[in-house]
Image (tube, rainbow, N blue to C red):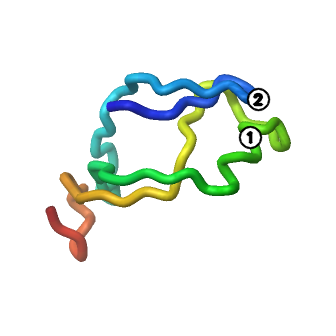
Amino acid sequence: MKAVVYKGPFDVQVENVDDPKVESPLDVIVKITTANICGSDLHPYEGRVDFESGMVLGHENMGVVVEVGSGINRISV
């Protein structure tokens, strides 16, 4: 899948990253259909907060549940 990856202040790149996997009973995998930039994404981009190089930006997303862990019982595919 593609992700916006932080490289440093004013430096982000769209890269192919590994698809997520259900690794614990409480994991939920969502296929992202829409992603947005939040104001808080600008803080590391502009160098105003420390952020580790290689981190994936973005948390304002919408999508479809495609897989759930065995401990999930109120969300279904």
Classify 10 Å Cα crowding around label 1: few (below 14), some (14-19), many (20 and above): many
Q: Residue furthest right?
A: 48
- Compared to residue 31, the image places residue 73 above or below, namely below
Where residue 64 appears, x then y in whole percent?
A: 24, 58
Badge 1 element: helix
Q: Earlier in the sequence, mark 1 or mark 2?
A: 2
Question: Label 2 near label 1: C-beta < 8 Å?
Answer: yes
Q: In the picture, residue 18 is in which quadrant?
A: top left
Residue 73 left/right relative to 13? left
- What residue does disc 2 label? 9
Residue at 65% from the left image edge and 23% from the top image edge: 7
Residue 31 left/right relative to 46? left
Number of numbered discs:
2
What type is the residue that disc 1 sits on?
A: Pro
Give the distance between the C-alpha atoms of the residues marked 1 and 2, in whole angstroms: 7 Å
What type is the residue that disc 2 sits on?
A: Pro
Residue at 50% from the left image edge and 58% from the top image edge: 60
Where residue 26 appears, x then y in whole percent?
A: 34, 59
Where residue 17 appears, x then y in whole percent?
A: 39, 26
Where residue 22 appears, x then y in whole percent?
A: 28, 45
- Compared to residue 77, the image places residue 34 above or below, namely above
The disc label shown at residue 44, or none: 1
Residue at 21% from the left image edge and 59% from the top image edge: 70
Classify 10 Å Cα crowding around label 2: few (below 14), some (14-19), many (20 and above): some
Residue 18 left/right relative to 45? left
